[in-house]
Amino acid sequence: MCFKSRLLLALPLFFATIVCGQSNTGSIHGNVLKPDSTPITSAVKVTLKVMRGDQMIAYTDQEGRFDLLNVTPGDYTIEADSDRERRFDVGSERVQVRRGVSSLVTIYLKEKKTETSSNRGKSISVAMFDQHVPSAAKKEFDKATKLSADGNGIESIAALKRAIAIYPNYLAAHNDLGAQLLEQGEFAEAENQLQAAIKIDSKAFNPQLNLGIVLLRQNKFSEALTTLDKALSIEPAAPAAHLYAGMASLNLNDTARGEKELNAAYDLGGSTYAVALLHLGKLYLKRGEREMALKSFESYLRESPNAPDAAQVEKLIGTLR
């Protein structure tokens, strides 16, 4: 029998390796605490985020605890929304999920900022989780999420289309459909779905980010950067938006901004966004700054020793030493 341990209050983020059979997924168990380290007693939304948007949602119980089960292994950001009275600002932590492992995490809500700045970091609009979504549409959306986690992209896309057919203003479904079509390389249709999501709510962060990626993949660099700037205006501290803004800037030969954005992506996202170091290395190499290029490539390999291009980068480092 596998006993799931609860996280002790007021502990920092850590991971517990509790292996439960041969599951191909992991789980996350945690607590949401107020800034004074006491548990939040009202239900708050906890969102598991990946670069393409929101992966999974849970709500805390009366002791501030939450569970996210059957999570695909990978690196995530996990975010706790404010309480209903909006006394606090959103809190977040990074978490790594491994196969057959229960990851434990504490998320601290933040002290409320002033009114002028409290909305700038908001990543999820009210429309994203519209309470008027019909149950039939929500059922198809949940089915799509599970199918995607199981690696069944084609059936997941079909379920999302059914959800939208039931409820055409389903912003989250349009966003996820756009993201999955992007992964399938169907850029034109992905763009249509993400534009539809933005039409529903222009202040929703995820569709803006995903549209920027779609435009970048189509080599529409100027349009991509404009869209990514909109995403950054909604969520200035989003490492993914900085990463892709940096890539778009480099393709527009704006190396100064490219360098700034790539550094921001790594500073904000850490090892999850180590690919920013690879792009920085290439930027410095192009400028002829060999020492800076070498440092960036070495840092990239330290952060991502098992990267698919590790052997290539190792050879490149050899030529620079």
Image (cartoon, grey):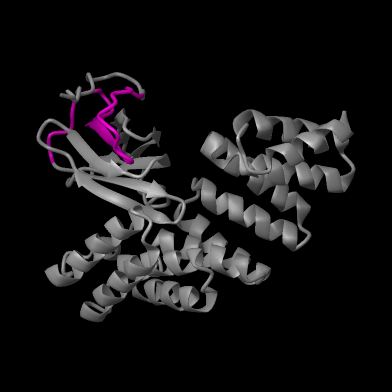
Residues in magenta?
15-42
Answer with the quarter of the image where residue 291 lies: top right
Would residue 171 be seen by someone viewing this image from the given angle? no
Q: In terms of depth relative to the viewer, which is nearer, 32 or 173?
A: 173
Q: Who's the residue at 60% across and 50% down the image?
A: 243
Q: Quadrant of the C terminus?
A: top right
Would residue 304 be seen by someone viewing this image from the given angle? yes
Answer with the quarter of the image where residue 3 lies: top left
Prevailing secondary structure class for the magenta stretch in the rendered image: loop
Q: Quadrant of the N terminus?
A: top left
Q: Is residue 18 magenta?
A: yes
Q: Residue 16 location in percent, x, y?
A: 32, 22
Answer with the quarter of the image where residue 81 lies: top left
Q: Who's the residue at 64% across and 28% down the image?
A: 302
The extreme left residue here reads 62
Q: Who's the residue at 29% across and 26% down the image?
A: 19
Q: Is residue 68 magenta?
A: no
Q: Residue 257 location in percent, x, y?
A: 71, 52
